[in-house]
Amino acid sequence: MSTLVQSGLAPLQSAVTGPTSLTPAMQSAIAIDPEPEVPELDFPESHQSWEMLSGLPILLDVSVPVRNFRVRDLLLMEPGTIVPSNWPGATDVPLCSDGVQLCWTEFETVGQTIAVRMTLMG
C-alpha cells in the first residue's frame, strides 16, 4: 500500500484500510471548477428586458442573387416588372438581419403582395 501512496496512485477509499488522505497533487488533479450558472430561458419573453427589447426595430433582408443586373435596369423598372434570377424556385431563401441568418423562408403571394413565409429556424 505504501508504494501506491508514494506514487500518487492510492485509491480514494480502500475497503480494507478505510479512507486514505489525498496528496496536494491529487487534490489539484481532481479539483473541478463548477460551471457558471446560466439562467434558463425557456422563452425570450421570460427575460427581464423583453418588454424593452421586443420594441426595437430590426431591418430584415431577403436576398436573391441576380446576375448582370445594373443600375440602368433598376431605373427602367416599373410596377409589375419581373426580374429573372438563377435561384431555383423550390429552394428556400435565407432571411437575415445585419448579415446574420435568422431563418429560411419561401416566397408567398398574398393578394397583390409578395411575402416570405418562415420554413426553418437557423
Image: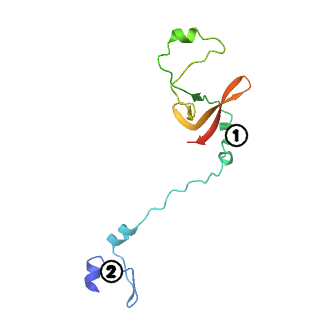
10 Å crowding of disc 2: few (<14), some (14-19), many (20+)? some
Q: Quadrant of residue 49?
A: top right
Lower position in the chain sequence, tag 2 or tag 1: 2
Residue 10 or residue 76, whichever sits in front: 76
10 Å crowding of disc 1: few (<14), some (14-19), many (20+)? few
Residue 74, above or below 89: above
- The residue identified by callout 2 is 10
Residue located at (74% from left, 25% from top): 111
- How many numbered circles are shown? 2
Q: Which mark is residue 16?
A: none
Q: Quadrant of residue 23?
A: bottom left
Q: Quadrant of the N terminus?
A: bottom left
Q: Amino acid at mark 2?
A: Ala
Q: Quadrant of the C terminus?
A: top right
Residue located at (51% from left, 11% from top): 71
Q: In the displayed structure, does residue 89 sit left or right of residue 27?
A: right
The location of residue 103, given as percent across then percent down, is 58, 38
Residue 52 or residue 94, whichever sits in front: 94
Badge 1 marks a residue whose secondary structure is helix
Residue 77 or residue 40, whichever sits in front: 77
Badge 2 marks a residue whose secondary structure is loop
Cα distance between the residues tagged 2 and 1: 57 Å
Residue located at (37% from left, 90% from top): 17
Residue located at (68% from left, 37% from top): 52
State the residue lying farthest toward the right.
111
The location of residue 28, given as percent across then percent down, is 36, 67
Whether the residues at callouts 2 and 1 have beta carbons within 8 Å, the answer is no
Q: Quadrant of residue 38?
A: bottom right
Q: Amino acid at mark 1?
A: Glu
- The residue identified by callout 1 is 51
